[in-house]
Image (spheres, rainbow, N blue to C red):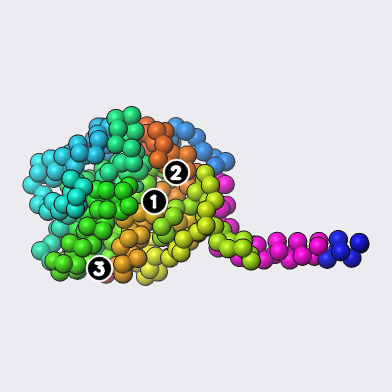
Amino acid sequence: MKYILGALGFAALAYLGLLALANFDALDDGARYLHAAATYAVAPAQPLDARGAFGFCEQFAELDNAARARFIADFLDARGIAYQRLPIDGSGFDNFFVPFAAAGPFTIFSAHYDKFFDDAAYQGASDNAAAVCMLLVVADELRKIKLARPTALLFTGQEESGLGGAKAFYEYATQNNTRVAEVINFDSLGRGGLAARASSERSGLVFTLPLVGEFVYDGRQALKASPYSQPDAALLARLRRVEPITVFDRMTANSDGTFFQANGWNAVNISSDDMYYLERTWHTYADRIELLSQDNLERALKLVIQYARQER
Ligand SMILES: [Zn+2]
């Protein structure tokens, strides 16, 4: 009996050891999540400045998807910024492609403008009004400055319906010989710093149970993990020269960048690095404009502008 218990104890210890080894990559991601949970406050450190560059976002977050598309068109029209409206097959919605050069290969900064629940009570402020507002401010800046490389913005629709906008744009670009160097896709900004996420069809923290398999925990349930891939190291290094970016190699994201990367484009999904905030608000009615923090949007804005100006 004693030997059996001893053997069991040894097996349990060995398994714990394997568990730690198999999840070594996930430990820093998990520790960051716990830190964010321990220090979380509902009110942001720096609420959006209503009279600042992102002040219009309060109005934008309230709009339904059709009105958001109109808002983007009006914003660009009012500033004389040229764009292409590209229909997303069968959806009644369009992508907005905003090139700042005659030809590629383009560095594209993208964000989806559609929200998960298309009703007035749901704002989707973090997902994804914040990134759209940030890129609209970028549009206004890029038209005034000289760019070191072909740069474009892309506002997609139908992201929340199976990445429909990303698929439509990929097909358009492929068929029309619009060359794409890289895509930096913003989804779920709002708090703290910026994070680059591993790309997967399922969002969450990936963990391994040795001898059992890989699972992904999205804050609500643990499911069998889908394959996930890391962003290109050289692209990450270029972005991190401009602005600090936390790398979450086990905190996966499913967004437009996921489709682009899976289809061979050099793409990365960037979100807030406060995973606790994202978990609490993601696809819930708590995802509201008053929870956004000004400094997070400013970081993203700085990243895009500086990166667009930088020589390769
Ligand atoms: Zn989103």
Q: Label 3: few (<14), some or many (≥20) within 10 Å?
A: some
- Mark 3 residue type: Ala
- Mark 2 residue type: Leu
Q: Could you tell me if the residues under marks 3 and 2 are in contact, i.e. CB atoms within 8 Å?
A: no
Residue 97 shown left or right of residue 283 in the figure = left
Q: Which residues are magenta?
A: 8-36
- Residue placed farthest to the front in the image? 90
Q: Is label 2 within 8 A of ligand 1 (CB to nearest ligand atom)?
A: no
Give SS at disc 3: strand
Earlier residue among tags 3 and 1: 3
Q: Label 1: few (<14), some or many (≥20) within 10 Å?
A: many
Name the residue that disc number 1 marks: 271
Any part of residue 293 in sight: no
Name the residue that disc number 2 marks: 278
- Mark 1 residue type: Ser
Name the residue that disc number 3 marks: 181
Give SS at disc 1: strand
Q: Position of residue 152 (x, y in %)?
A: 19, 58
Q: Could you tell me if the residues under marks 2 and 1 are in contact, i.e. CB atoms within 8 Å?
A: yes
Position of the N terminus by quadrant: bottom right
The one nearer the camera, 286 or 42, is 286
Q: CA distance from mark 3 to mark 1?
A: 21 Å
